[in-house]
Image: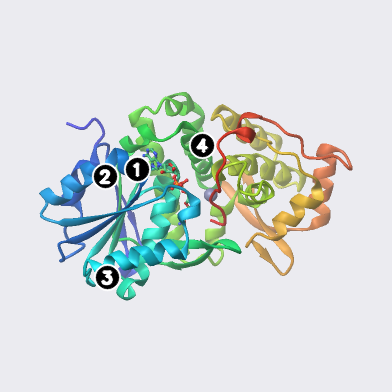
């Protein structure tokens, strides 16, 4: 018997509604769980080499046992794969194997695989069903929920894409056991974000359980994924296409994206940059008179205890402001930020250059640079990372 019972989080989007199903060990039952989403035996299992080495055979076994005829499509791991060229290759495979309108794509992997698979499903024969089986923390709490799919363009990340909802999101938290530690910790930044934007009780839970989470204890890990999905699902249900309310999900991402882009996407991975953003944007909110010391201190302390940095790379005000300008959260030259007023509640407000400059210089001294903090994140594995989510 599994120790943790199956959990279901509904995502309510009218006729595009679906369930997020969460259970340790779920992967072995994927075949049975996709019944009802397709009448065709053909299933395209899109994954990457790393994930395939751990989970592809088990997934294929489960699909075959349930009577399906799966075709694996194995991609190179990492952000550089998120291109139209990859989409084209997937479409070639689907056409070659005579996939029909009812055939289903399964995205088995992290956010890269999920974004690619969702987009391929959205455009093959004007849309075929797809199911997300996310295997990174980022994908389980963020990218697999909400319907944003797409690929990068040479001139910008996530520049090409579509809103396309999966038929289900099937989460097996046990897959996180093989995830590189750095990826796990980066995902915790998005989890902490949910506490700040929507749920003080959840934030307190994280403060209490962070040691157990760092040890990957099954019960708190499952709770964290479930609560994060609930919060994201609620926000997305209220605002599917990101007009206003959905912006609250961008908390920590204005400065986070700026740091990521200043590092040329080769230094910090996305969640690490967001970790810095969570702390620095709270500090900026305090400077704007929107929140008190306690908010900044609690966020800083939790981020640090999670193993994330509060400040990472050196930068000048000019370059960080200019990087913030290039983010999609800019409207009419003003940067639209998300600011905590207390833990569990944020407001959306534009910020002017003058105010941001005052904050920066008060913190670091005029002419100074945002000091470098933790060194480990700087020099380690280099890869492009996610952005503009
Ligand atoms: N659609 C959205 O709303 C949304 C939201 C956030 C991020 N994203 C996108 O998600 C992507 C980042 O996703 P990610 O952080 O999951 O990165 P990723 O998909 O690149 O996965 C990270 C690494 O972990 C490996 N991996 C995945 N699962 C594993 C497992 N269980 N065991 C061992 N290794 C495993 C992968 O092969 C890869 O090397 C970016 O492209 C970003 O734009 C999309
Ligand atoms: Zn993010």
Q: Which mark is residue 95?
A: 3
- Closest to the camera, between mark 4 and mark 1, is 1
Label 1 CB sits under 8 Å from any ligand 1 atom: yes
Tag 4 secondary structure: helix
Between discs 3 and 2, the one toward the N terminus = 2
Return the residue at label 4.
203
Asked whether disc 2 touches disc 4, contact meaning CB atoms under 8 Å apart, the reply is: no
Between discs 3 and 4, the one toward the N terminus = 3
Q: CA distance from mark 3 to mark 4?
A: 47 Å
User: Is 124 rendered above or below residue 203?
Assistant: below
- Closest to the camera, between mark 3 and mark 4, is 3
Return the residue at label 2.
56
Question: For this view, does 252 lie left or right of residue 315?
Answer: left
Asked whether disc 3 touches disc 2, contact meaning CB atoms under 8 Å apart, the reply is: no
Nearer the observer, 195 or 151: 151
- Percent across and percent down for residue 330 are 68, 63
Q: How is the image coloured?
A: rainbow
């Amino acid at each position: 018997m599994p120790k943790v019972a199956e959990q279901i989080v509904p995502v309510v989007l009218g006729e595009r509604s679906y369930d997020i199903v969460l259970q340790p060990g779920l992967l072995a039952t994927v075949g049975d769980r996709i019944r009802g989403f397709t009448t065709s035996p053909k299933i395209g299992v899109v994954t990457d080499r790393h994930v395939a080495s751990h989970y592809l055979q088990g997934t294929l076994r489960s699909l075959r046992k349930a009577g399906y005829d799966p075709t694996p499509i194995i991609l190179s791991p990492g952000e550089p794969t998120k291109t139209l060229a990859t989409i084209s290759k997937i479409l070639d495979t689907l056409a070659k194997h005579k996939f029909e309108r009812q055939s289903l794509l399964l995205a088995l992997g992290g956010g890269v695989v999920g974004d690619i698979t969702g987009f391929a499903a959205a455009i093959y024969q004007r849309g075929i069903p797809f199911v997300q089986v996310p295997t990174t923390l980022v994908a389980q709490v963020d990218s697999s929920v909400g319907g944003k799919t797409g690929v990068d363009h040479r001139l910008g990340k996530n520049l090409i894409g579509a809103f396309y909802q999966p038929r289900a999101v099937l989460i097996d938290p046990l897959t996180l056991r093989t995830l590189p530690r750095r990826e796990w910790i980066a995902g915790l930044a998005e989890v902490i974000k949910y506490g700040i934007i929507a749920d003080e009780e959840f934030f307190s839970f994280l403060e209490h359980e962070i040691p157990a989470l760092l040890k990957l204890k099954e019960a708190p890990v499952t709770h964290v994924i479930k609560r994060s999905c609930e919060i994201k699902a609620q926000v997305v249900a209220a605002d599917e296409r990101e007009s206003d309310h959905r912006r609250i999900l961008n908390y920590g991402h204005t400065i986070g994206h700026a740091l990521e882009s200043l590092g040329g996407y080769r230094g910090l991975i996305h969640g690490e940059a967001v970790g810095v953003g969570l702390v620095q944007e709270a500090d900026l909110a305090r400077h704007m008179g929107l929140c008190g010391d306690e908010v900044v201190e609690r966020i800083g302390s939790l981020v640090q205890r999670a193993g994330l940095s509060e400040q990472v790379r050196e930068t000048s005000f000019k370059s960080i402001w200019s990087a913030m300008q290039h983010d999609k959260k800019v409207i009419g030259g003003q940067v639209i930020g998300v600011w905590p007023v207390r833990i569990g509640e944020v407001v959306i407000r534009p910020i002017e250059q003058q105010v941001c400059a005052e904050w920066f210089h008060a913190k670091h001294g005029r002419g100074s640079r945002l000091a470098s903090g933790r060194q480990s994140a700087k020099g380690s594995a280099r890869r492009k990372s996610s952005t503009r989510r």
